[in-house]
Amino acid sequence: MRVNVTVNGKQRTADDVWPGESLLYVLRERLGLAGSKNACEQGECGSCTVYLDGVPACSCLVAAGQAEGGDVRTVEGLADGDRLDSVQQSFLDTGAVQCGFCTPGLLVAAHDLIERNPAPSDPQIREALAGNLCRCTGYEKIMDAVRLAVERKQATT
Amino acid sequence: MSAPARSPQVLDDKISGGIGASPQRPDGTLKVRGEFAYASDLWHENMVWGATLRSPHPHAGIRSIGIAKALAYPGVHAVLTHADVPGENAYGLKHQDTPVLAEDRVRYQGEPVALVAADHPEIARQALKLIEVDYEVWEPVTDMERAAHDETLPRLHENGNVVRHQRIVKGDPDARADVVVSGVYELGMQDQAFLGPEAGLAVPAEDGGVDLYLATQWLHVDQKQTAHALGLPVEKVRLTLSGVGGAFGGREDLSMQVHSCMLALHLGRPVKMSYNREESFFGHVHRHPARMYYEHGATKDGDLVYVKARMYFDGGAYASKTPVVVGNGTTLSVGPYNVPNAHIEGWGVYSNNPTCGAMRGLGAVQPTYAYESQMDKLATALGMDPAELRIRNAMSEGSTTVTGQVVDFPAPVAELVRRVRDMPLPPPNTDELGFPGGAANTTHGEGVVRGIGYGVTIKNIAYAEGLDDYSTARVRLQVIGGEPTALVHTAAAEVGQGLVTVQQQIARSELGVERITLHTSDTSVGDAGSSSASRQTYLTGGAVRNACLAVAERVYALAAERFGVEATNLSGGKVVAADGAVVADLAELLGEDVIEETREYHHRKTYPLDPETGQGNAHVQYGFSAHRAVVDVDTELGLVKVVQLDCAQDVGKAINPDAVLGQIHGGSAQGLGLAVMEEIQVTDGVVRNPSFTDYLIPTILDMPPMRVDILERPDPHAPYGVRGVGEPPTISATPAVANAIRAATGLELPRVPIKPEHLTGT
Ligand code: FES
Ligand code: FES
């Protein structure tokens, strides 16, 4: 089948999509956007998190057909050209990236949190990121990264 | 060439991002942009997908394998079995006992039996189902203690079921003591659970060889084993590291390496393999489960008199790193304490459980859990404070280990314990979400008790027992775009820990050059050894330093030749004399010259253990860490909330303090996971929970805030005084959490992970 989606602001078409393919597979293997990661493909790790019509979703759980006509924003669509989004910059500045496999999904989840809640408390940050596994960092620096991104956002608004 | 400036001047040697700083990772920007290519992201024109058929049985004979139907399935290009393995159908890190593809028997559930290559991963999966394997199912060997002693059990390998037995005897093995405590302790099987699945892309080459791009921990050992199984000379099997999504030991054994190359060579086209999570649980080795019998004797004042221990490690179907687990487990069996008398025995065995091998804290996690449980039990028996008991018995520089080795470097164990003990304690919980159970709101504090526990560990760093452990680095210095630039090339695996940053930092400091680029890690340079045993900053760091020093020597020779001046230092882009005077500008001196040097770094020699007494200088260095955990336990529901987890660790010298912190945080999380949730549940050799739905790792809700105290007591024998960092915090976190739960509940809790039913007694 054919699937049409808007990805990071561009109209994209994938042909010969199998009925069983996930949005994650289509993004990674058919549209060349491998930024969203495939750590479990069961909705447990959050490494495949993308915005689908403005709401974060595990793209491994979304059937490609379900995304037809949808608006997708992936980790590749967070930066504005060469300028990193402040969440991305904060992850770098705090050392929240080790192997980085969890990073794309965490960035989308954290980005969404800060959009919705400009001043999240620590428990709220933890609650919002509870669906994103990271095996390397123990989450301390991820907490630092989100706090920094929040601070920076508050400083500019 | 301008004349050298000989006038003394203030040097602008502020090369930023050198040793001791925490510069950003060179791969960081790509990673946050989603543009970093992990092994599972690789793609090649004309590639097909490989898939692996695995045994559903833990122990069975294979009567026949029928591939005709699978081969006839549309979209399938190849189906291969053991008959297609071009070289010897055997590999292994320590013993070559593992078939690439099973022949006449399988020894664990998940053992690879056949391979498929197809146009689409789903077609490959469908085709796997069409392969007909006729199994004769056998009774599995599953109990580690029986495997060690029961001669009536089936022999799983030619030499029987004991992979290694090691005894250590120190002092008087029959010594007597005023106070004696004993216990039997067990650990479940832990998984590395790295997030990036096993993956790689094999591309056949025109010379009849193959280029393999993959995620691994040790390129050269993969290369050697893969070439052997393919029947090719090593130089025809070239490996290049792609992005690695974590490792923690789980990538030290082969997974898809030979399989993807077999398919690629067979088809003459590129083959990609990428496991899904379920397959990943079967596709790599795990941490050895263990059963340990311990007895500690002490004077009534609290001085340890003796330790007796019998320890069993279940290695599963193939040897992998079991010999090393027994070596580490026995030599580290009494912990970072002074113990005058000891009798220790360890067995590592074969069984039909999943194969176990390397995981962070190799062979030290198990005994640390046991002896730290014992230390608390002893403290209770003596009526002593558990931290005080540890401090009283702590080893220090000059202490003699249980193998008779004298510790000739700092060993600030007592100070580490004092530091975590003296950190401020968290206030009682007042937040509704902060109780055990969290947002599920299962309690408002009723039935909740708090406990504090300690865990302290000693871990050997780098390879031991006589192995020549080394790494290689090539450094090239030249002027690019008017700026002196160095290219560092090693085969060392960046697996997330930040070794790429550390290599840049060392080269910056040694060469006084800001711009350091890193060559992709591959097998076109000498062996770097494994990214394991907390050894890379030490070994590859040492190799990069040596190569930089060799490059610097040639720069000095050049300066001497041109200017007749003896230079001794490179700093801030300048060539500098001993008196601090600038001899030349580095870029000017180099001009068009390219200086390249390759050097190795070997650590101090170690020695094998005496087979009878276990005495010997087996280890080159130890790392030490201490944790203090504070937990709240809901005794009615059996739920645990770790409220605070603090750590003090001696790292010798923090080359990159931020990365050191990251290792301590991440390691502690894995240790917490083992204490309260992580276990591959195996029944009769069959894995019951091969998914992230059922194998739980700590989430951001499970991890408490951490306070970390980093000590830097340089090891005079190591480059820059560094001490391995990655493993100790994983090890000491587990008993700290377990001891805190015991302190809260008064329960004995002889097994980790501690589950709700252990706490409620239901
Ligand atoms: S890959 Fe989608 S949640 Fe894990
Ligand atoms: S950085 Fe490796 S999984 Fe998060």
Image (tube, coloured by chain):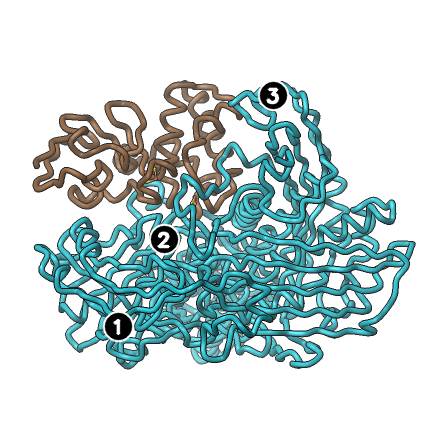
Chain colours: A brown, B cyan
Q: Is residue B287 or residue B114 the one in the foreground? A: B114
Give the Cα distance between marks 1 and 3.
57 Å
Q: Is residue B761 or residue B596 the one in the foreground? A: B761
Does label 3 lie on the same chain as label 1? yes
Which sits earlier in the primary sequence, circle 2 or circle 3? 2
Does label 1 lie on the same chain as label 2? yes
Q: Is residue B84 left or right of residue A58?
A: left
| Local crowd size for mark 1, using a 10 Å CA cut-off: few (<14), some (14–19), many (≥20) | some
Q: Is residue B235 left or right of residue B674?
A: left
Q: Is residue B682 or residue B621 the one in the foreground? A: B682
Q: Measured from the top left, where is residue B532 in percent x and y? A: 50, 62
Q: Is residue B21 visible?
A: no
State the residue position of label 2. Answer: B280
Compared with residue B209, is residue B417 higher up or lower down, i.e. above or below? Answer: above
Which sits earlier in the primary sequence, circle 2 or circle 1? 1
Residue depicted at x 83% and y 71%: B174
Residue depicted at x 61% and y 64%: B312
Q: Amino acid at mark 2?
A: Ser
Q: Is residue B72 visible?
A: yes
Q: Measured from the top left, where is residue A129 in percent x and y? A: 44, 31
Q: Measured from the top left, where is residue B456 in percent x and y? A: 69, 52
| Local crowd size for mark 3, using a 10 Å CA cut-off: few (<14), some (14–19), many (≥20) | some
Q: Cβ of disc 1 within 8 Å of ligand 1? A: no
Question: Which chain does the residue under circle 1 lie in?
Answer: B
> SS for tag 3?
loop
Is disc 1 in contact with disc 3, using a CB cutoff of under 8 Å? Answer: no
State the residue position of label 3. Answer: B443
Question: Which chain does the residue under circle 2 lie in?
Answer: B
Is disc 2 in contact with disc 1, using a CB cutoff of under 8 Å? Answer: no
- Quarter containing the N terminus of chain A: top left
Q: Amino acid at mark 3?
A: Thr
Residue B82, label in figure: 1
